[in-house]
Structures are given as C-alpha cells and as structure tokens.
Amino acid sequence: MEDEHNNGVYGQSPSSRKEKTEDQHSVVIPDTAHQVSNDSWFQVGVVLSMGVNSAYALGYSGTIMVPLGWIGGVVGLVLSTIVSLYASALMAKLHEVGGKRHIRYRDLAGFLYGRTAYMLIWALQYANLFLINIGYVIMSGSALKAFYIIFRDDHQLKLPHFIAIAGLACILFAIATPHLSALRVWLGFSTLFMILYLSIAFALSVKDGVKASPRDYSIPGSGDNKIWAIIGATGNLFFAFNTGMIPEIQATIRQPVVRNMVKALNFQFSVGVVPMHAVTYIGYWAYGSGVSSYLLNNVHGPDWLLGVAHLSAFFQAIITLHIFASPTYEFLDTKYGIKGSALAPRNLAFRLFVRGGYLIMTTFLSALLPFLGNFMSLTGAISTIPLTFILPNHMYLVAKKNKLSSLQKSWHWLNILVFGCISVAAFVAALKLTILQTQTYHVFADL
C-alpha cells in the first residue's frame, strides 16, 4: 500500500485530491451565535432521552407493534436500539476530525466530502427536522383535543383548531427559549411531564389488560396492503431513535467532548430507552391490534387522571420540538448576527417574526395532513435512515479509511447497502399509505 504522502488521506490520485481540497476549502464554516461546550454529559443524556420518550412514544404500540406483531415488533425494536447506539457512537467519534471540532452535521460533511455534499446534507437534515417538527405539532394538537373531549365532547372544535393552538404555544416557547442550552430548567419540567404520561399510560393499560377478554394480536390487513404496512413500520422502528443532529447536540457538551458524548449516549440507550420500550409493549399487550396511534385514546380511568396525561403529553411535545428545531434556529440566529442578551428588543423581535414564521408554516402543514403514523414512516425513510445509519457508516469509512481492516470496511459497506435498501422500501411504502389515506380523509381532517 502506498503511504499517505503519495496516495493522499482518502486514497485518491493527486488531481482528484486537488479538486477535493479546493471543494473543501470553498466551504465557509460560520461561527455560532449559540453556546458551545456548556453542558454536562448528564444534561445532554437527558436531552437525548427526551427525544426517545417524547409523546411520540405513545404511538409506537399502534405504529410499530400492530403492523409487525409480537415477534417482529419486539425483535425489531431491540435491534434498532442496538444499531442506533452503534451509529450514534460512530458520529460522536467523528466530532473531532482533522484537528478541529465539527459542531454541525453539514460542517462534518463539508470537511469530509466538500461543498456539494455540504449543501445536500444540509438540505437533507433540515427536511428531517422539519418533518419531525410537523409530527410534534400534530401530536401536541391531538393530545390537546383528547383533553378537550374528556370534559366537553361537543365537536365544536376540530383537530385543526387544536393544532393551531399547539402551534401558538410552540411560538411562545421559541421566543422564550433562545438556544438549546437554555432548556436547563425546562428539562426538569419535561422529565416530569414524561414521567406523568408514560406512568399513567402504563398503569391504566395494565389495569385494562388484566380485566380485558383475550385480545387479537394478528397483523391486520391482507395482501399488498399488509406488506406495505409492514415495510412502513420498519421506517417507524428507526424513527423512534432519530439522531440526525448528533453533532449539534454534541456541540453543547463540555470537554472532553467525545468521551462525554459517549457517556450521554450510553445513558440514553440504557436507562433512557426503558420507559419507551415498556409502554410500547404494554400498550400492545393490553389492546392488541386495536391499539391506536395515540395510546391514551385506548385507556380507561378517572377523567382527571386522563386529563393530566393528555396535558403532560401536550406540554412535553412543545418542549421537545424545540430540541429538533434548534439547528434551524441556530442557523438563522448565526446568519443574521443575533447575539447578546436574549431580552434585547432586536433579538426578541427576530425570534417573534422569524421563528414565528417558521412555526406558522409548520403548523399549517400539520393541520393540512395530520396523518401522524405516515409522517413517522416518511421521516424515517427520507431522512432519519440516511442521516442516522447510512451516512455515519460512510463518513467513518472516509475519515478512517487507511486505519480500517478489510473486514471493517466490508462491515460498514454492508450497513450502507442494507439501510439504503430499507430507506428506499420504507419511502415507497409510506408514500403509498399516505396517498391511500388522503383518499379516505380530506385535508384538514378531524382524526
């Protein structure tokens, strides 16, 4: 094998290496307006765990277990947990490459691939985050509607109205919370809300399951529709562990950044995933194939207790949305030089109009097509799988190419191939299911 001096870091010819270097140098990496290296590994671990145990977790009994059944659902969820930890650890180890930190996903892509990949991955990541935010607005609106129905089931207000209220709440929270590190006190509230709705859902599901007659656990549907639903649920498996912004979250952690991020990831994928797994399996056990994509719609209990659970899911979804919106906010704040006091009139006005505009668009699309399960599948296929599983493996190959054995290279290429096929299949399935659902429900549907 030729040495690095003769063959280049990436094993390319001198001419191609020159083109690549010029392309890399054309990528201008801006400083950030947000805080860097400020948070403990435990705080970052809690932030990551919030994403796993968000109100989305109340839907996995219906969107993962029902289409896949006991064996497919449990095995798939356990395997996706292990694979997600592995892929996230790869990304964490790439945070310091080439003697510098890469605090954004696109910055790392620009360093490894050049300007074209920098732009493409930037677009892919923001599509991912935008779709996730749409899902959170749908979820928070659905939770608020469920709370309203408990006390006043007069059908005067429809789901689009509650989605609009949820969008307004998201705007107010975005104005009050300037950056990701400012979530500190809100992490406590979010954890409390998470414990409340998961504990209530778990306890009431157990109560209902013990009293219920034998449930039907057969996979619903027949023929092609059943196959498409199974493929779509595969996208949901990986959506559950969406980590398409590991570099941005890792940017907030204190030195040593790699070691502390690995600690945070180990916390997320051990203690942090237990509640999500537990409520997913218990919900399916209690209600079988009749469980909905929002578990609290199935449980029975005192109105006040259900009301607490619904409101907890509503507020927690609003807080967690801010995590996945923060890269967008960071880009906008950095581009327009929003620094200094968060209470400065210019900064307040900027967050009101710019973040408000972004969230108004998000809320409108959420109300237009409020098909939560299909948004999970689409998000998983379009962006979660490429960002979380395909690119980390390829980036690791590029960054560590001359240090990997043939077996290690083959392993990473196998991951790229397998997840590439899964991504394409899940996208086709999610698109087909969304088209079918739009034929059944009109836009701005009251689901």
Image (cartoon, rainbow, N blue to C red):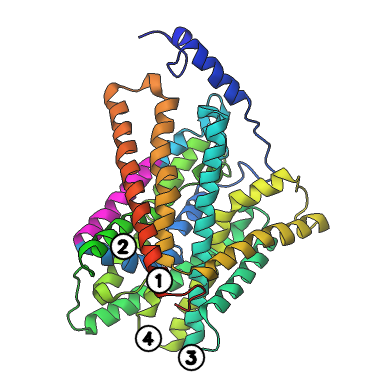
Element marked by disc 2: helix
Labelled pair 1, 3 in contact (Cβ < 8 Å): no
Crowd band around label 2 with a 10 angstrom C-alpha radius: few (<14), some (14–19), many (20+): many
Q: Which residue is mark 1?
A: 439
The boundaries of the magenta stretch are: 71-87
* Amino acid type of the residue that numbered disc 4 sits on in the rendered structure: Gly
Labelled pair 1, 2 in contact (Cβ < 8 Å): no
Name the residue located 49 percent from the left edge and 44 percent from the top edge.
246
In the rendered image, residue 226, in percent from the top left (x then y), is placed at 24, 64
Crowd band around label 3 with a 10 angstrom C-alpha radius: few (<14), some (14–19), many (20+): few
Q: Which residue is mark 2?
A: 64
Distance of label 2 from label 4 (alpha carbons): 25 Å
Distance of label 1 from label 2 (alpha carbons): 23 Å
Give the number of the disc on residue 156.
none
Which numbered mark, 1 or 2, is in the foreground of this view? 1
Q: Which residue is mark 4?
A: 301
